[in-house]
Structures are given as structure tokens and as C-alpha cells.
Image: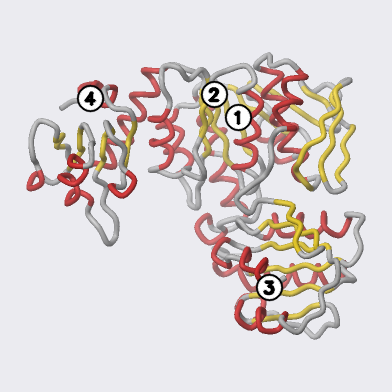
Amino acid sequence: MTIAQIHTCFLECSSVSIDTRKIEKNSLFVALKGANFDANAFANEALAKGASYVLIDNDQYYLNDQTILVSDCLETLQQLASFHRKYLNIPIIALTGSNGKTTTKELFQVVLSQKYRTKSTFGNLNNHIGVPLTLLSFTKETEIGIVEMGANHQQEIAFLCKIAQPDYGYITNFGKAHLEGFGGVEGVIKGKSEMYDYLSENNKKVIVNLDDSIQYSKTLEMDKITFSSLYPSSFVFVNAIEANPFVKIKYHDVEIQSNLIGLYNATNILAAITVGIYFNVDTNAIKQGLESYYPKNNRSQIIFKNKHEIILDAYNANPSSMEVAIQNFIQLDRKNKIAILGDMFELGEDSFSEHQQIVNFLQNKVDFICFLIGKEFYKVKKESSFLHFFENFTEFSEYVKHFSFNNNFILIKGSRGMALERTLECL
């Protein structure tokens, strides 16, 4: 079968599935392989559960006319997604970056959906499998598509751009994330900038934060949609910004009171305003969309528990996001502060020095109790009346059973693998 023929079969289906445990009736089941599984073996089960077609790459599992045999299921999934993207011919906005991708994607969604039928990446399905699944979730009813792209090594963003063929692109920032895979900060900049390379080569537009000197310099010759809090000549200019703790922005005569904390989220909000204005969404509708958005999934959530006010930011962490989160926490006008911080992962040979830098930063900046949890923080342990180190979460949880909490303002921040949302059970 050609990709065009497979696409015809796909259009008869209501969705795409890669997991028979979550399969939907009338879906296209794609039998992907993993390190410890081969989904070809589940082709019969997928059909029994209501799939209309199954895509396989092992002929021993061929069943009937509902079975589509290809040479490689993953490659076919990616080719099918790219074909479908061309078939729809709608504006696609792609975004990547070290921090804030998912929040910014969701802000783009709530703003643009005020005027357009908009679909975006579900959750964090932003890799070589997630991006094709996102594109295949777009339908003829979709007027604008938003595609989040994640990466932890070189050429990944370039590959995802070839699949999604975005018309617009936005990089939230260049930070110290996935240093191990990218090969340091310069590698991060090079890897994320593959989006700029694609957009430039294909004469597409880039959304640029002019306040970021690196992004400004990398997009000098590109077709830009700009925003800034420093340069009044930018497409969107806003310098009326507050955050204590929630970000409030005044754009022209419209005041937007968000439910996001920290000045670092002001940039994400400004990007969403910019996209809205560019696509002719009414300013009051932009306000309505942004004010309706509440963070979830452990991303900068405000939680009240046992008289504590808690910033739960435990979805992920890297040196850049950790430092801005701490800096923002320091600046907030609250009493009885406590920070509970966990290890940062995927830093490779930079792990020791990056954790040490965070500890040095805390020693120089904070005058409140900080609990630091994990093997990496424990390696840089220092004697301090404010800093308390624990090699693992169990040690921490035992210690805090006897710690006297009292109407505290608490920051919880760490990499996903630390699962610091467990801390809520200790408070």
C-alpha cells in the first residue's frame, strides 16, 4: 500500500491507537515496537476490541483485509502524519524550548480557541511518536494546529519539523536542560535552533521575544512576529507587568489577571498575547482565554493545605528553571517560607557542578529553611543552618515527621523522577 492509500483507510477511522489497553472503536491501531515488546502480537486483540484497521510490520501476524502490512510501523506512522498535515493544509504553530513549552502551548490554545477551532498536543506527546499522533488528531474541522516539540539530542527538532512542516515557530528559551544529550549549553542552543533553521529555509515566520538577546541575534534575517517589554517598536509591547504571586499584565487598556505565578511566566503570557493579536483575536477575548487558564499536572500549581500555601512545581526541573523558581520565590511577599528541592536529572558530567551552583546560590540568597533531596544534592552537601540535605525521599519524609510546620509558604521543585508531589502527604 502507498501512503496515500493508507491515508484513505485512516480517514475512515475515528482515531489512532498504539496501546490496546486504551483502544477506541473504529480506530487505526499501529503496532509499534519497544525495547521489551512487539505490538504486532496484539493485532488480533486490537481488531477484536473494535479497531477498523491494524498497521503491522511482521507478516506472521497478517490476519485479513483489515491488516495493513508495511516495512516499518514507526516510519509509516511518521510518513502518514506528514501526508495528513499536507492534506489538511492548515496553519501549524510549532514550539520548543528548555522551559515552559507545555504551559505556553496551552496558553496558545486557550487564546486561539476564542476565535478558531484549535487543536494542540495532548499532554506532553512531543517526541518522534507524539508529534505524529498529534498531527493525526487534527481533522478537517481544525482551523489551527499547535504542535509542541521536545528534544534531548541534536537533529531531533529538525526531524520533527520535517514531519510537522510548521508555518510558525516559537522557542520559549535556551536553558540548561538535557545537557547530557545535547552536550552542554551550546549544544542546547544549537539543537533548539534547528527550528529556526527549518523556518528560515522554508520562508516561514518565527515568533521572537526581543528581550532574549540570543534569540534576537539568531533571528535577525528572519520574518518575525515580535514581542517585548523593552522595545516599543515590537509587534506587541508590554511593560506593565506584575507578579505577586500571580502575573498581571496590562496590554493597552486591557488588564489581564492570570492564574500563573512568577515573572518567568510573564514571557509565556506575552507570547500567547502576541499569537492572539497576530491571528486577529479580540483583545478582550484574549483576556478571557488567559484568565480562564489554570495550571495543572504539578506545573506551578497553587495549593492550600493545612494552613500552608504551596507552590507545587514538581513536574520537572533543570538548572535554569530551578534558579528562576527560587529567585521568584525569594521575591514574593510572604512570611514563613520553606523550599523543598529535588535533584535535577539528565545533566551528565555537569551534574555535580550544576547542583553545587544551586547550593551556592541558596547559601548567598536565602534566609529560610531549604530541604534538598536526592543523591546529587547530597554529593554537594554543606554545613548550613538553613540548608538540610537528604540522600533520598525516605530520609526526608522521616525527618519532617518531627519538623514543626506553621502556616508556611512552601515551594516544591524537582525533576519528574523525584516525584516530589509526594511531599504533600508529609505536610
Question: Which residue is labeled 4 in the image?
Answer: 9
Q: Is residue 82 above or below residue 258?
A: above
SS for callout 4: helix
Q: Give the residue type that dot 1 points to.
A: Gln
- What's the residue at 42%, 38% (across, down)? 159
Circle 1 residues within 10 Å: few <14, some 14–19, many ≥20: many
- For the residues labelled 2 and 3, say whether their Cβ atoms are less than 8 Å apart: no
Q: Nearer the viewer, residue 87 or 139?
A: 139
- Between the residue at mark 1 and the residue at mark 4, the CA separation in whole angstroms equals 29 Å
Task: Say which label, 1 or 4, has the lower sequence index.
Answer: 4
- Between the residue at mark 2 and the residue at mark 4, the CA separation in whole angstroms equals 24 Å
Circle 2 residues within 10 Å: few <14, some 14–19, many ≥20: some
Task: Say which label, 4 or 3, has the lower sequence index.
Answer: 4
Circle 4 residues within 10 Å: few <14, some 14–19, many ≥20: some
Task: Say which label, 3 or 1, has the lower sequence index.
Answer: 1
Report x, y in % for residue 112. Answer: 62, 23
Q: Is residue 413 above or below residue 5?
A: below
Q: Give the residue type that dot 4 points to.
A: Cys
Q: Is residue 182 above or below residue 234?
A: below
- For the residues labelled 1 and 2, say whether their Cβ atoms are less than 8 Å apart: yes
Q: Nearer the viewer, mark 2 or mark 3?
A: 3
Q: Nearer the viewer, mark 3 or mark 1?
A: 3
- Between the residue at mark 1 and the residue at mark 2, the CA separation in whole angstroms equals 7 Å
Mark number displayed over residue 109: 1
- Between the residue at mark 3 and the residue at mark 1, the CA separation in whole angstroms equals 35 Å
Q: Is residue 364 left or right of residue 311?
A: right
Q: Give the residue type that dot 3 points to.
A: Cys
Question: Which residue is labeled 3 in the image?
Answer: 426
SS for callout 2: strand
Question: Which residue is labeled 2 in the image?
Answer: 118
In what quadrant of the picture does the C terminus appear? bottom right
